[in-house]
């Protein structure tokens, strides 16, 4: 717990420094702690340290962790690639889905709605030249955003992106910001930019990121799954 708190404080200090360097208020940036492969006890410890936003990449792990006794004010973000057949399970567990990259997935999440609840979603943008990577190609981003806006149980919050390994993060996040600006012209409330992980969150903050996805720099090395 002591080490966890030390790492959390250190990352938060770096986030605040990057925000102030770029003339931004650190309070406008949401730090999502990714707990992939870590036990639920880590989630409880994070909650005790004041963390209220956590993320998972895999539906099964998200479902398992959210089946535990709920923690006050904790908000779950699904940030991984999603299969349409698992959309219902994801929707039952997450308050926000960052990885909507096709109409079929948007439809599946919409069909899984219960009563009048609305799900926060982001359009994931593929910032690479690899068509096999997750995310919609930039030229199709606005079209997909318009489609999501037509589904009343989904609330379009903005965009998500992952910087390519073979490009400077700053230039990739600049493109993401441009796409975000275009989508905000369709929906003024779509202000979220989910970008930046341990190695590039400073560049993401400089480009206007509102949500950072940070894992092992806070949680420590992932447990051996083998």
Image (cartoon, grey):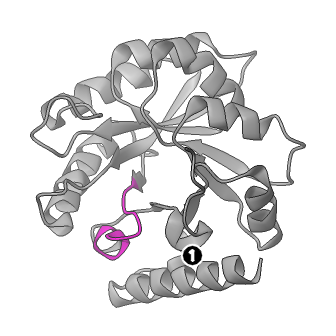
Q: Which residue is mark 1?
A: 27
Relative to 181, is 68 on the left or the right?
right
Please provide percent x and percent y for residue 200. 31, 70
Binning the other alpha carbons within 10 Å of mark 1 as few (below 14), some (14 to 19) or many (20 upward) gives: few
Please provide percent x and percent y for residue 179. 22, 46
Q: Residue at x 36, y 72 (%)?
A: 205
- Furthest residue toward front: 226
Give SS at disc 1: helix
Q: Nearer the viewer, residue 73 or 192?
A: 73
Please provide percent x and percent y for residue 53. 65, 57
Total labels drawn: 1
- Residue 94 makes an appearance in the image: no
Q: Is residue 201 above or below residue 215?
A: below
Q: Residue at x 41, y 69 (%)?
A: 198
Quarter of the figure that contains the N terminus: bottom right
- Residue 197 makes an appearance in the image: yes
Q: Is residue 136 above or below residue 87?
A: below
User: Which image quadrant for residue 63?
Assistant: top right
Q: Which residues are magenta?
A: 194-204
Q: Residue 197: within the magenta? A: yes
Please provide percent x and percent y for residue 56. 57, 44
- Furthest residue toward right: 69
Relative to 119, is 217 on the left or the right?
left
Q: Is residue 152 above or below residue 81?
A: above
Q: Nearer the viewer, residue 81 or 155?
A: 81
Quarter of the figure that contains the C terminus: top right
Q: Residue at x 14, y 66 (%)?
A: 168
Q: Nearer the viewer, residue 170 or 56?
A: 56
Q: Residue 130: within the magenta? A: no
């Amino acid at each position: 717990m002591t080490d966890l708190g030390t790492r959390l404080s250190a990352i938060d200090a770096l986030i605040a420094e990057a925000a102030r360097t770029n003339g931004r208020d650190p309070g406008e940036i949401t730090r999502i702690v990714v707990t992939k492969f870590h036990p639920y006890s880590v989630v409880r410890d994070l909650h005790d340290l004041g963390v209220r936003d956590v993320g998972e990449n895999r539906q099964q792990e998200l479902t398992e962790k959210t089946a535990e006794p709920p923690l006050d004010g904790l908000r779950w973000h699904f940030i991984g690639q999603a299969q349409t057949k698992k959309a219902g399970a994801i929707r039952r567990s997450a308050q926000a889905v960052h990885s909507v990259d096709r109409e079929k997935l948007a439809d599946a999440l919409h069909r899984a709605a219960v009563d009048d609840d609305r799900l926060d979603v982001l359009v994931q943008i593929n910032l690479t030249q690899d068509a096999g990577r997750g995310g919609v190609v930039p030229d199709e981003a606005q079209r997909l955003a318009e489609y999501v806006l037509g589904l009343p149980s989904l609330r379009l919050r903005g965009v998500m992106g992952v910087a390519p390994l073979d490009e400077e993060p700053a230039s990739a996040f600049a493109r993401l910001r441009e796409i975000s600006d275009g989508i905000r012209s369709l929906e003024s409330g779509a202000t979220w930019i989910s970008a930046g992980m341990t190695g590039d969150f400073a560049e993401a903050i400089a480009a206007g990121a509102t949500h950072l996805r940070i894992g092992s720099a806070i949680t420590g090395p992932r447990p051996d799954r083998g």
